[in-house]
Each structure stands twice: as C-alpha cells, then as structure tokens.
Amino acid sequence: MQLLSIVQGLFSSLLTVLGELAILAGETVASIFCGRVRVWLTLRQIAEIGFGSQLVVVVTGAFTGAVFTAQAYFQFASLNMETAVGPVVTLAMFRELGPALTGLMVAGRVGAAMTAEIGTMKVTQQIDALRALAVNPVDYLVVPRALAMFISMPLLVVECVGLGVLASFYVGVHVLNINGVYFFANVQKFTEGSDIMMSLIKGFVFGGLIVFISCREGLCAKDGAVGVGRATTATVVTSSLAILIANFFLTMALNILFPAGQR
Amino acid sequence: MNAPLIHVQDLVQRIGSQDILRGLTLDLFSGETLVLLGKSGGGKSVFLRHLIGLMRPVSGSIVFENREITTLKERELEPVRRKIGMLFQDGALFDSMNVFDNVAFPLRERGERRPTVIREKVAQSLEMVNMAGHDRKMPVNLSGGMRKRVALARAIISPPAVILYDEPTAGLDPIVSDSINRLIRRLQNQLHVTSLVVTHDLVSCHHIADRVALLDEGRIHFLGTPAELRGTQDPVVRDFVDGRSGETVY
C-alpha cells in the first residue's frame, strides 16, 4: 500500500514537471514568434554557450573518436576488417556518440551554470524585481538562452563529430597503420547526408531539453543557497537522463526517416 | 476624499498552514503617503507583493484604477507594473550589471536608446539618492545601504504613479535615512507620487506619513494620522509604538 502511494507520488511529480516544462517551452516559443527577442542578450548567450563550450566539446569528440578507433581496430584486425574501422567510427559519431556526448557535456557545463544563475536570481528576489519592472522573466531570461542553445548545439555537435572523425583518421592511419586511402574511401562510401541530418536534429532536440530543464529548475529554485545547489544537481541529473532516454526514442523515430544500412 | 487609487477588500493569504492575511481591507488615495506598520513576519511584505501581482491571494480583491488586478494574467499585469514601482527590502539589484546599468534598466526596457538621455537620467537619479560617482561599481561591492539607495534610484528613474517601499530605511544610518525620507516627501510633493511605505522606523513614519496603518493578526488594526497614532490608547498600538514585548524579565 505504501509502495503504491510512493509510486503514485513519483508519477504525479513526473507529470507536474513535464507539464511545467511544456508550459515553459510553449511560452518561450510563443515569445520568439511574437518577436520578443533581445538580440544583444542572445548574442551574449551564444558566446557563453557556443564559444565557451568549445574546449570541452573538442576534447570529448577527439578522444572519443580516438579511443573508439583503437577499440574497433583491436576487434576488427583479427578479422582482417581494419578498413571498416573508419565508417564504423564515423557513423557511430554522427548518429549516436557526437550528439549524446555533446549533450551530456553541455548539460554539465552550460545547464548547471544556467540553473545556478537563474536560481540565484530567484532566491535573491532579482526575478521578482524583473517582474516588478514589467519585464517578463521568460522573455528576458529564457528566450535568449533557448535561441542561443538552438543555434549553438547543432554546431557544437558538428564540431564534436568532426574532431572525432579527424582523431579517428589520425589514430587509425598514423598510429595503427590502417591504409589511409581505404579508410577515407570507406568513410565516404558509408556516410550520407542523412547521418549528418540525424546528428543535427538530435543536437537541436538535446539543446531544447537542456535549456528548458535548466531554466525551469532555476525558476523554481527556493530555500536559498541550499536550494540553488539542489536545483543545479537536479539539472545535471535530469538533463543527462533526459538526453539518454530521448536519444533512444529519437534513434528509433529517425531511423524510419533516415534508415541505416540501405546503401 | 475622492475614490481610492488602490482599493483592497478582504484580502486573504495563507502560506502552508499559516494564515498571513485574514481579510485585510485598506484604501490608498492618490498623492498620499501611507505608512504600514506591523510586527516582523506579520505579512506586511506579503501584502506589498499582492499589490503588484507578485503573489495571488486566496480570496479578496485589489482594484487599481478601477480594474481588478488579482485575476490578471502575468502579461496583463505588465501595464499595471509600469504604473506601480517597488523598492525591495534588500534592493534586489541585478548582480550581473553595474550600478549604471541597474539604474538604466527600466529606461532601456521601455525602449530608450539615446545614450545621452540615459546617462543624464541615471546621473540625476543617482544624485537624488546621494550615490553619484558610484555608477561603475558592481552590486557585490556595495554596502546594504548603498544597494538600497541604488534600488531606489532604479525605482524612480521613470517615476511611476505609485511606489511601494519595503523597509526603505532599515539598516541605514540616521543621516541617509533622513535623506531617503526627504526623497519620498519630494517625490510626493513634486511628482505627486503615491507611496505605500512598510517600515518599523517610527521616526521615518512621523516624517513622511500622511496616514498610518498598523497591521496586526493579518488585518488593519489601526488607521489614522501620525498625530492620532501618537495619541491613541489602544493597547496593541501602544505596545508597538512604545516597543513593549509584554514578556516578563526574570
């Protein structure tokens, strides 16, 4: 009986969170379409989210590409399939690893910072001050961050994947002595525009998940510094889980649009 | 007197199991300065937040300029908030902006883009609160009193019809408190700003108030002029004015 009430409670909290996220996303999209966009704030957020995340995304992409190449090579070499390493790594980077890893990294770096900043504003009455000055917090705080995220995330994903593929090429050809011509030819043969599209769409969706989860947690923060800390932790955990779960459903849905293995 | 600018009727607010406001009724008339006194934690700040739509009551009504505001949605409240400014208890300055940008914020948000006009108005506002020359400082580098004065400069840069002051002189030295009191008076005399001031500072109260209200147990217990406040024999008012807690010292 007690277990049932706990499950009911969890389910009802989940529905509340999803509802709040949907309302926040709806308000944000409506504000964007109504032209309530502050260009200067959006550019600042692009610098913060896009430019500021370069290092973490580049390092993550490059070393994931490198280590995946090494592992794939160790397995494929025994089957004399070394030249398949390139396309395997490239497809995995485009379709799964690039978007998911970029999403996780950005959730940790940018999402946490967003929640901390907005949450601190909430608990120190700065958001009330915004409202008292007839400025809508969604227009002022969420819209610039959402726009910046929607612009930056696909580009960051492309950067992560690009660096991963380059690192894969370097490790495969220069360290593990795979024939460079075959490596490159197979990558070209098995990679299509649809793989890039899938990667961009996932980046866009993950960006939306991160920004709305982070902003909602910040806007709902309470109980002072402790509450801001709790909200920040919740942002990283929730965003990461949401990205991993959404990734599966996106993969299944996008595979219908862009089927793999049809070449 | 004419019809009230703000009419509050039977306002009830409950937070958790605690009744904060229990049917508060109060009128605020155009051009007056009404001081609201009351115990700490008695719901004075909560009441102010209702007047600007930052909180919604459990029941009751607030009519501003013949319009019920408790039922308005967030975006519908924006025109009301352009007419009612609020000074928060600890300033609520935006800590990502320096003093200049904080004070200029309402102007820029209302579409003012001319740098010379913005500079001039910010300088004027900062001058009024004795904060000239501090415009490049960040809020984190200001004392509590300075933050409050900058927040006041922000509230008055494009003077609203009504200003709600939440403890404007708390934590300030007597000289700065006096300059704030004079500023509230000047805004009333020169710009006909209507003010509702929440305070514990009886010196300030006698200096600025046209009328005084005492909030007790979630209701207005006393309403009158400062002279009537001084002369009343009501035990609740006397305890507050004379600073008697009613506790026995052993």
Image: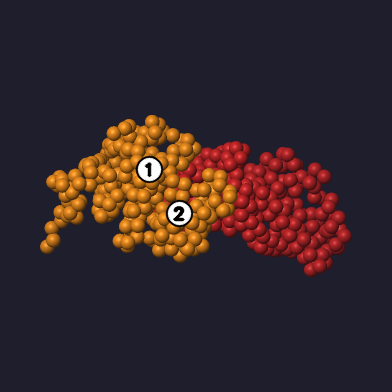
Amino acid bearing label 1? His
* Pointer 1 chain: B
Residue A220 seen in this snapshot: no
Q: Position of residue B226 (x, y in %)?
A: 22, 47
Give neighbour class at mark 2: few <14, some 14-19, many 20+ (Cα, 10 Å): many
Q: Secondary structure at mark 2?
A: helix
The chain under label 2 reads B
**Going 35% across and 38% down the picture, which residue do you hit?**
B30
Circles 2 and 1 in contact, beta carbons < 8 Å: no
Q: Which chain is orange?
A: B
A101 to the left or right of B198: right
Looking at the image, can residue B104 be seen? Answer: yes
Horizontal arrangement in the rendering, residue A188 relative to residue A200 (left or right):
right
- Depth order, front residue of B192/B86: B192
Q: Residue at x 33, y 58 (%)?
A: B177
- Left or right, A46 with respect to B230, comes to right
Type of the residue with mark 2: Ser
Mark earlier in primary sequence (2, 1) = 2
Q: Which residue is mark 2?
A: B125
Q: State the image coordinates of residue A63 (x, y, percent, origin top left).
A: 70, 63
Residue drawn at point x = 51 percent, y = 57 percent? B100
Q: Colour of chain A?
A: red
Which corner quadrant holds the N terminus of chain A? Answer: top left
Residue bearing mark 1? B192
